[in-house]
Amino acid sequence: MTPNKILPGGRLRRLALASAALWLTGCASLSPDGGLQPVRDATRQHLDQELALPRDAQQQDELARRVQELLAQPLSERSAVQVALLNNRGLRASLHALGVADADRVQASRLPNPGFSFARLKKGDEREIERGFTLDLAHVIALPLARRVEDRRFAALQRATVMEVLALAAETRKAYVAAVAAEQMARYQQDVRESAEAGAELAARLARIGNFSKLQQAREQGFHSEAVLNAARAEQARVAARERLTRLLGLWGAQTQFQLPERLPDLPQQPDAREGLEQLAMAQRLDVQAARAQMEATAHGLGLTRVTRLASALELGWTHNTSNEAPRQTGWEIGFEIPLFDWGEARSARAESLYLQSANRAVQTAIEARSEVREAYLGYRAAYDIARHYRDEVVPAAKRVSDENLLRYNGMFISVFELLADARAQIAAVNASIAAQRDFWTAQADLDMALIGKPSLAAPAAPGAAAPGNAAAGH
């Protein structure tokens, strides 16, 4: 007959009190905001923006009103980032995942529930009552270490969530810049198309009265056809850039009619001269910190595996048996797993491999961080130099040529077609200047992200690649 497992009255009360005291002093409690506060603090520190996670209908309505207020005015880069942080549903899902991890952390700090069993047996006139009380002793022994492991995992997830917030902000900045630049380019391509239509119509009229050769007319018609295609491509690029920004902002319905400014901001007078970028990135990049935290958590997990290697199934129980035909039985028992076939080497080897894996990943993360910040800064400086060259040299030169040709046309030294061709060349130069400005502000966002997290660096353009509109300038 299985021995009964129950404490006698006094000992049962003392054990219950001791267990309650351990539970009250050692367990963790759920965070009031689901572990969101460190993410909010990091968002304010690195972005100077607010982060919110609505949990009921009232909070959702307040957040919707805030988003609508931001959308009521033409979006700036800063307001676009704020809308994305408040309204992107993918980010909200990640923030809710923090609440799941917080619950797991608290659950890991709880003492295991004791087991209680009750049985009433009958054998002839004999009646026997069995009561059992058990506690998973192995779980209790490993509880402090398991709690520290879960705390570190939760902290690592908070850092990863902060990185997701920063990455969303950086991608929103880049999408905003691309959308504004695409709007500008579409307008300039429309100007080219209208200029080409006027030239083609004039060439057709002159050809009908015999004052224009078929070759000249074909050239003007060819340019008009190409200008129509370029305007269509520019419109397609404008819609695609705007829709990408819309997705990042989490907008739908009437919200998608948000307004953008007419042009990109001007270049700064001087680029930032930042010293010690690699050291700064190592000190504050959150992916490096997350990799270190993961390595520490894995190291503590290795210690937990070693502690529970042979004590993974250890139980402590007390017995109290009563019978109407036999004296009362009291006592205690300890049950444990006999490591006859599994001595835990596989679990220990797995934990050691996981630790070495996380250690190498942490080193690789640091190497990549140093390289990325160097690449981002060099890209930033190159983009600034190119944009400044367009601003200070290419566009002013095109304007001077245009002014001179206008004087020559007024003096009847050149034809209207030469004047139109020069106007098209000037528009192409301005269009290329817009692209250079776009690339600079994109590089600025990449550099800012490279100092605090992993950036998504764009591949550099191939040498000799034609700027937008250059094909038009050749006609």
Image (spheres, grey):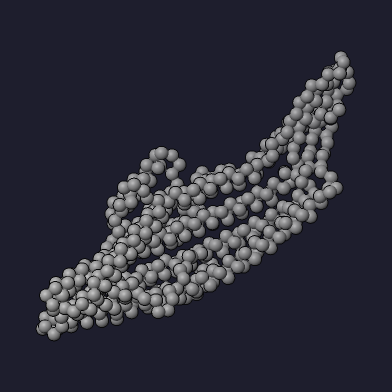
Q: How far from the left and from the top, in percent, is residue 197?
A: 20, 68
Residue 217 drawn at (x, y percent): 21, 75
- Picture residue at 47% right of the left edge, 60% below the top: 167
Q: Quadrant of residue 446?
A: bottom left
Which quadrant holds residue 137?
top right
- In the displayed structure, would residue 388 be above or below residue 194? below
The spot of residue 298 in percent (x, y) is 66, 57
In the image, is 206 to the left or to the right of 182? left
- Which quadrant is home to the N terminus? top right
Is 384 left or right of 37, judged from the image as shown? left
Between 240 and 350, the one nearer to me in the picture: 240
Choose top left, top right, bottom left or bottom right for residue 208: bottom left
Q: Residue furthest bottom?
A: 413
Residue at horizontal 74 percent and vertical 46 percent from the top:
141
Question: In the image, is residue 269 above or below residue 133?
Answer: below
- Residue 16 or residue 334, whichever sits in front: 334
Q: Quadrant of the C terminus?
A: bottom left
Give the residue at x 39% y 61%.
Answer: 175
Query: Hey, which residue is sitting farthest top in the picture?
Result: 125
